[in-house]
Amino acid sequence: MNSIAIYPGSFDPPTNGHLDLIIRSRKLFKKVVVAVLRNTSKNSLLSIDERVKLLRECTKDLPGVEVDAFDGLLVDYARVRKSSHIIRGIRALTDFEYEFQIALLNRRLAPDIETIFLMPREEHVFLSSRHVREVALLGGPLEEFVPPPVAVYLAGKVRELNRSYKPES
């Protein structure tokens, strides 16, 4: 069994698809580091701290899973964590094209670090954090799409956002 894999992403919010890949990655590696990217160019619903906290809550019963945040180049972070593997999820052909280009770039930057593509289970193929954010912001049910702690947290977050929203007159 390989030792450490990095599973990077924005996880805004964490979905059942993310959790599925974490669980399945853990079967391949002794340790999986779920690495939340600090991406200041994205307009996020959840802060880095909120995403890390939620992921820790969702993975607390999964031995060998650690949650961390990082910025900068993923391959540099992988080296700091002494990992030679990066896990990426592929839902559709469009994901593959994007992820393949990133994997080739990472290989050019760090030939010693391999990217492994995993497909989610069929029931999670349609899931994306972007769509889950939209459902949450429009008050839709989340239980089918995200782990229970995330559904509860998002419902509270949306209530908070709605209370602070002041429409223009």
Image (spheres, rainbow, N blue to C red):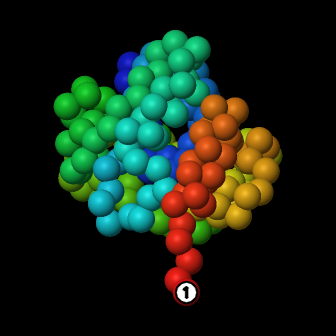
Left/right of residue 168 with respect to residue 4 in the rendered view: right
Q: Position of residue 9 (x, y in %)?
A: 44, 48
Q: Position of residue 11 (x, y in %)?
A: 50, 47
Left or right side of 99 for 110: left
In the rendered image, the residue lying farthest to the front is 169
Place residue 77 in its image quadrant: top left
Q: Nearer the viewer, residue 71 or 57?
A: 57
Residue 83 vertical placement versus 121 (above, below): above
Q: Position of residue 164 (x, y in %)?
A: 52, 60
Q: How many marks?
A: 1
- Three-letter residue code for mark 1: Ser
Q: Crowding at label 1, few (<14), some or many (≥20) Cα neighbours within 10 Å?
A: few
Q: Where 3 sits versus 94, above or below?
A: above
- Residue on which disc 1 sits: 169
* Quadrant including the C terminus: bottom right
Which residue does the image show at 63% across and 52% down from the upper left?
159
Relative placement, left or right, of 114 versus 87 is left
Question: Could you tell me which residue is drawn at 41 percent across and 29 percent down?
Answer: 67
Residue, far bottom:
169
Residue 73 visible to the viewer? yes
| Rendered residue at 77%/57% (across/down) | 140
10 and 100: which one is in front? 10
Residue 16 is drawn in which quadrant? top right
Q: Is residue 154 visible?
A: no
Q: Dot 1: what SS?
A: loop
List x then y, in percent, for residue 47. 40, 48
Could you say which is closer to the camera, residue 158 or residue 113?
158
Measuring 30% from the left and 60% from the top, which residue is drawn there? 40
